[in-house]
């Protein structure tokens, strides 16, 4: 029996993400980016899709559970979702990939990555105050400046990207 491809809009885990072609993974990443752009920037779905380099149809295909259809027929992005994401984070165990479900965990990972970047630019340790002890995907996020300095000196922060470019 042939291996069946997952419904691309319903990727539930790393195995299903890896089963998508490179092109589908990239399209899904752009769709998730559009959802994020709409939330953070308060943009319409069509404006967010354009900014992310995709279309509303592609966003619907890969991120339908994050959308709500209005009575006018237009789509609006829900405040939160439970979509699967595979994220790269700096944890107390080192730089690791974690599997998360939902925009809230992705938001925390993004806040952490931004805090690490800001700390690197300013040296202000207070950027970690809200993140101390926070866990996502089963790991604790690293907030110790001395450890982060070691991670940076090892080159782990060079071109740090929260989302993987292809399922590894």
Image: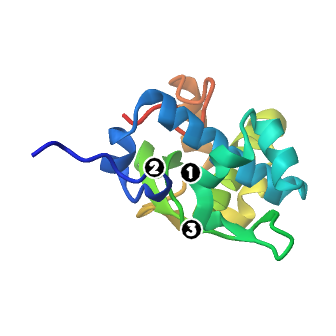
Q: CA distance from mark 2 to mark 1?
A: 6 Å
Q: Which residue is mark 3?
A: 133
**Percent coordinates x, y for residue 99 in the rendering:** 43, 55
Element at label 2: helix
User: Which label was assigned to residue 38?
Assistant: none
Q: How is the image coloured?
A: rainbow
- Residue name at image x 45 percent, y 49 percent: 8
Quadrant in which the C terminus appears: top left
**Front-most of residues 55 and 127:** 55
Whether pointer 3 and pointer 1 mark residues with C-beta atoms closer than 8 Å, the reply is no
**Percent coordinates x, y for residue 101 in the rendering:** 49, 64
Element at label 3: loop
In screen coordinates, is 108 left or right of 77?
Answer: left
In screen coordinates, is 113 left or right of 17?
Answer: right
- Residue name at image x 46 percent, y 52 percent: 92
Element at label 1: helix
Q: CA distance from mark 3 to mark 2?
A: 34 Å
Q: Which residue is mark 1?
A: 62
Q: Which residue is mark 2?
A: 8
Among the two numbered marks 3 and 2 on one chain, the one whose residue lies closer to the N terminus: 2
- Mark 1 neighbour density, 10 Å: few (under 14) some (14–19) many (20 or more): many
Image-quadrant location for residue 132: bottom right
- Mark 2 neighbour density, 10 Å: few (under 14) some (14–19) many (20 or more): some
Among the two numbered marks 2 and 1 on one chain, the one whose residue lies closer to the N terminus: 2
Whether pointer 2 and pointer 1 mark residues with C-beta atoms closer than 8 Å, the reply is yes
């Amino acid at each position: 029996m042939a291996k069946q491809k997952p419904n691309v809009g319903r990727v539930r885990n790393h195995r299903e993400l890896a089963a998508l072609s490179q092109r589908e993974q990239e399209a899904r990443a752009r769709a998730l980016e559009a959802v994020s752009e709409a939330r953070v920037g308060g943009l319409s779905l069509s404006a967010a899709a354009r900014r992310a380099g995709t279309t509303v149809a592609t966003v619907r295909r890969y991120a339908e559970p994050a959308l709500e259809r209005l009575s006018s027929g237009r789509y609006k992005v829900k405040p939160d979702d439970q979509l699967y994401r595979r994220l790269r984070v700096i944890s107390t165990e080192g730089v690791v990939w974690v599997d998360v479900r939902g925009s809230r965990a992705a938001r925390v990972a993004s806040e952490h990555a931004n805090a690490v970047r800001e700390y690197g630019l300013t040296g202000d340790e207070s950027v970690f105050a809200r993140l101390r002890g926070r866990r996502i995907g089963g790991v604790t996020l690293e907030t110790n400046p001395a450890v982060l300095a070691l991670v940076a000196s090892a080159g782990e922060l060079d071109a740090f990207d929260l989302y993987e470019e292809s399922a590894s």
